[in-house]
Image (cartoon, rainbow, N blue to C red):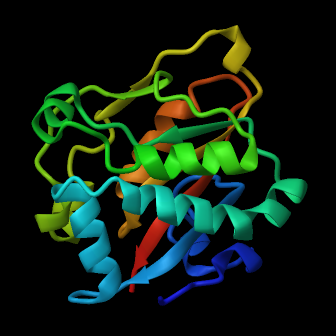
Amino acid sequence: MPLTQYHLDCDNQAVKKFYGRIDIEHASAFLYFNKKGIVQEMIHNLKYKGHEEIGTFLGNWYAEDLKELILKTPFDTIIPVPLHKRKFKERGYNQVATFGKSLSESLNIPYDESILYRKKYSKTQSKKNLLGRSENIEDLFDVDFTAEHHQKHFLIVDDVLTTGATIEACSRALLKIPGAKISVVCMAIAN
């Protein structure tokens, strides 16, 4: 498995994706994603073939690496990148949910998929080029929060970090919450 070890490097390629775009406390990805590689096959099976156990496996494995990190950078809540209700109905599940829930259980951090939501339906990002991925993404997400969410450090989880546009849009929505801080953990990063 092509492990990144990004959790050990505070200036890794995942962090660099957000330089000058959004203030991120921490960003890391577990695996390198290469076209036609084993990680692409795993993510494809998770995302399109219903193999949710892949997310559980990766979450449990990566949680072991992240245990030391959370001593220095504690997270209050794990939030998955949400699917639009229509996409959720089509697929039947959110492909990052089992990953996030496994991290939550292993790291003893609450998991909450109700704070961040997707407002607009959009086609899959995986078939879009760099420009297409960043078009109209700013208005895709919003938040539903209360005073208990103020001053919290949110850990956004996603499957593959490519341009960072989706995570940036999620972060911008979450930063509407007073005092919010954002970190990111992904299953893989496009190589």
Q: Is residue 108 visible?
A: yes
Q: 143 or 42: nearer the eye?
A: 42
Residue 2 point in image, percent of width and height:
48, 90
Q: Is residue 116 above or below residue 80?
A: above
Q: Is residue 64 above or below residue 3?
A: above
Residue positioned 28% across, 89% down in the render: 37
In screen coordinates, is 172 left or right of 12? left
Residue positioned 32% across, 50% down in the render: 95
Residue positioned 48% across, 55% down in the render: 56
Tally of marks = 0
Q: Is residue 182 visible?
A: no
Quadrant that contains the C terminus? bottom left
Residue positioned 44% across, 41% down in the render: 170
Residue 55 point in image, percent of width and height:
42, 58
Image quadrant of residue 121? top left
Image quadrant of residue 24? bottom right
Q: Is residue 113 above or below residue 82?
A: above
Q: 189 or 170: nearer the eye?
A: 189
Q: Is residue 121 above or below residue 189?
A: above
Which residue appears farthest toward the top when viewing the image? 146
Residue 32 point in image, percent of width and height:
44, 83
Residue 167 point in image, percent of width and height:
44, 51
In screen coordinates, is 27 left or right of 122? right
